[in-house]
Image (spheres, helix red, strand yellow):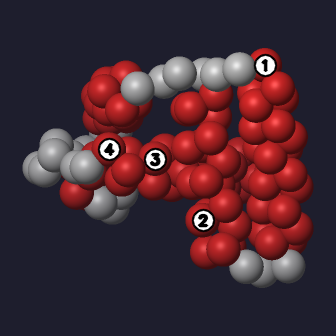
């Protein structure tokens, strides 16, 4: 990616993050998640992360989570994408990462 375009993409990523926070604070979590998907997609392009690399990362997260999960019941609450029952299109991996990030934030906030 050329330098000028990369700088503009970084600015877009920053702007999306700001808008995402505004939406979240004002109770528009679904819209915020959509912006997060856009932001993650731009970050992938900026950092030249391929679809297969993202899929591998998501699989590593799934395996790591499964190892940390005490029972299959707990894993099933996360949905089919975490229990290996289906192979997902790459764009859904971005959604999964978004869901994992939101769940992680909720867990951190509940500890405080």
Q: Which residue is mark 4?
A: 90
- Answer above or below: position of 106 versus 54: below
- Answer above or below: position of 96 versus 77: above
Quadrant showing the N terminus: top right
Q: CA distance from mark 4 to mark 3?
A: 7 Å
- Answer above or below: position of 36 versus 108: below
Marks 4 & 3, CB-CB < 8 Å contact: yes
- Going by the image, does 15 lie left or right of 57? right
- Answer above or below: position of 29 versus 3: below
Q: CA distance from mark 4 to mark 2?
A: 16 Å
Q: Which mark is residue 34?
A: 2
Q: Which residue is mark 3?
A: 94
Mark 2 neighbour density, 10 Å: few (under 14) some (14–19) many (20 or more): some
Mark 3 and mark 1 lie on one chain; the one further toward the N terminus is: 1
> Horizontal and vertical percent for residue 37?
57, 54
Mark 3 neighbour density, 10 Å: few (under 14) some (14–19) many (20 or more): many
Q: Which mark is residue 11?
A: none
Q: Which residue is mark 1?
A: 3
């Amino acid at each position: 990616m050329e330098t000028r375009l990369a700088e503009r993409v970084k600015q877009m990523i920053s702007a999306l993050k700001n808008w995402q926070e505004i939406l979240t604070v004002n109770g528009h979590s679904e819209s915020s998640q959509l912006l997060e998907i856009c932001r993650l997609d731009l970050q992938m392009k900026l950092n030249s992360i391929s679809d297969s690399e993202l899929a591998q990362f998501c699989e590593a997260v799934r395996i790591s989570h499964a190892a940390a999960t005490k029972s299959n019941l707990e894993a099933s609450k996360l949905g089919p994408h975490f229990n290996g029952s289906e192979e997902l299109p790459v764009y859904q991996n971005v959604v999964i990462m978004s869901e994992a990030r939101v769940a992680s934030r909720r867990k951190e906030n509940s500890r405080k």
